[in-house]
Image (cartoon, rainbow, N blue to C red):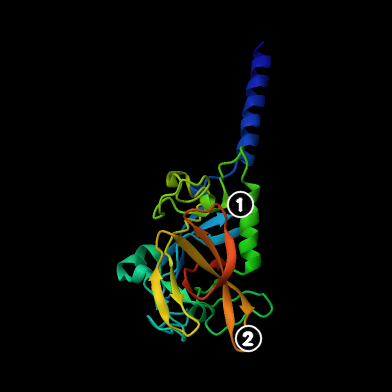
């Protein structure tokens, strides 16, 4: 009788051990505190999602890794902007950067790694890498996992305008962010074809993040690509951006 009880007890322990080995880690367990420091001394948490490690905060540097200053509130040259045109928003939402600032003179013609505006050891994610993130999130969207729709799984639990659309960041935000990516709706700066800043707004509406990919408009002109969420939608979308958006760097 004792041997039987011992055998059953050992089997239960083994079963629990195996279960714990295959259990998905929570978003909190995947967070890497103070994973990277930029040249300004800002520290950023990172998060492991699938096989990738992403910054879990929006970039807020005022300089490139070599110490070169990124101008504030310009158009054609590299520039950064205050979210919602308010300097107080930078600590939480980071800066909005235009395409020139993000790429820092590099052009991803071979779809390789572009450090651009990112700290050393990190790079501006390409469309392929954004798609890898999205594909991984989709593998976790099922009743047996904690993940919801992609936008909801990636969005922060705060800052979004309210929405009644199921699976959107604005619908019950407390259930957002099962990935730990913590996308914040910093809005965008809208710049015209004539290089005029039309507005810096839409905080709470959108989270736009730059890619290193681009579309060629003419021999001398490129539109940078971006990936974005909105408070009413359930997807992570990809499109060109004429203006300024947020930056999330990816570890090399």
> Marks 1 and 2, how far apart in space?
35 Å
In-image side of 82 versus 163 (left or right): left
For residue 249, above or below residue 31: below
Residue at 57% across, 58% down:
236
Tell me if residue 219 comes above or below residue 87 in the rendering: below
Dot 2: element: loop
Residue 89, picture quadrant: bottom left
Q: Is residue 176 above or below residue 53?
A: above
Q: Secondary structure at mark 1?
A: helix
Q: Residue at x 34, y 71 (%)?
A: 85
Q: Which of the labelled discs sits on residue 218, or is there none?
A: 2
Whether residue 241 is visible, yes or no, is yes
Q: Residues within 10 Å of mark 2 (few under 14, many from 20)?
A: few
Pinpoint residue 102: horizontal percent, then vertical percent.
Answer: 51, 77
Q: Is residue 4 left or right of residue 159?
A: right
Q: Residue furthest top?
A: 1
Q: Looking at the rendering, in which quadrant would you find the N terminus?
A: top right
Q: Residues within 10 Å of mark 1 (few under 14, many from 20)?
A: many
The percent position of residue 245, horizontal first and vertical second, equals 47, 70
From the top left corner, tell me how far across and down residue 24 is, in percent: 59, 43
Q: Is residue 124 visible?
A: no
Q: Earlier in the sequence, mark 1 or mark 2?
A: 1
Left or right of residue 114, residue 85 in this image: left
Single out the mark in the foreground, 1 or 2. Answer: 2
Quadrant where the C terminus is found in the figure:
bottom right
Q: How many marks?
A: 2
Residue 173 percent location from the top left of the image: 44, 47
Circle on res. 231:
none
Q: Are marks 1 and 2 in contact (CB under 8 Å)?
A: no
Q: Is residue 101 above or below residue 143?
A: below
Which residue is labeled 1 in the image? 137
Which residue is drawn at the image coordinates 44% and 44% (left, top)?
172
């Amino acid at each position: 009788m004792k041997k039987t009880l011992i055998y059953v007890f050992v089997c239960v322990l083994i079963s629990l051990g195996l279960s714990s080995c295959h259990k998905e880690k929570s978003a909190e367990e995947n967070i890497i505190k103070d994973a990277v420091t930029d040249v300004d001394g800002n520290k950023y948490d990172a998060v492991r999602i699938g096989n990738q490690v992403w910054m879990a905060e929006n970039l807020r540097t005022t300089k490139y890794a070599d110490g070169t200053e990124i101008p504030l509130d310009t158009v054609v040259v590299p520039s950064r902007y205050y979210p919602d045109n308010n300097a107080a928003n930078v600590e939480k939402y980071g800066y909005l950067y235009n395409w020139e600032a993000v790429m820092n003179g590099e052009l991803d013609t071979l779809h390789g790694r572009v450090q651009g505006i990112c700290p050393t050891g990190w790079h501006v994610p390409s469309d392929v890498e954004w798609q890898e993130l999205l594909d991984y999130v989709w593998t976790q969207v099922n009743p047996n996992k904690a993940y919801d729709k992609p936008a909801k799984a990636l969005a922060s639990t705060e800052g979004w305008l309210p929405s009644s659309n199921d699976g959107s960041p604005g619908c019950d935000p407390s259930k957002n962010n099962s990935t730990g990516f913590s996308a914040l709706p910093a809005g965008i700066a809208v710049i015209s074809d004539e290089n005029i800043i039309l507005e810096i707004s839409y905080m709470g509406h959108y989270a736009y993040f730059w890619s290193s990919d681009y579309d060629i408009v003419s021999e001398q002109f490129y539109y940078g690509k971006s990936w974005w969420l909105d408070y009413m939608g359930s997807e992570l979308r990809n499109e060109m951006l004429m203006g300024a958006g947020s930056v999330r760097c990816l570890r090399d």
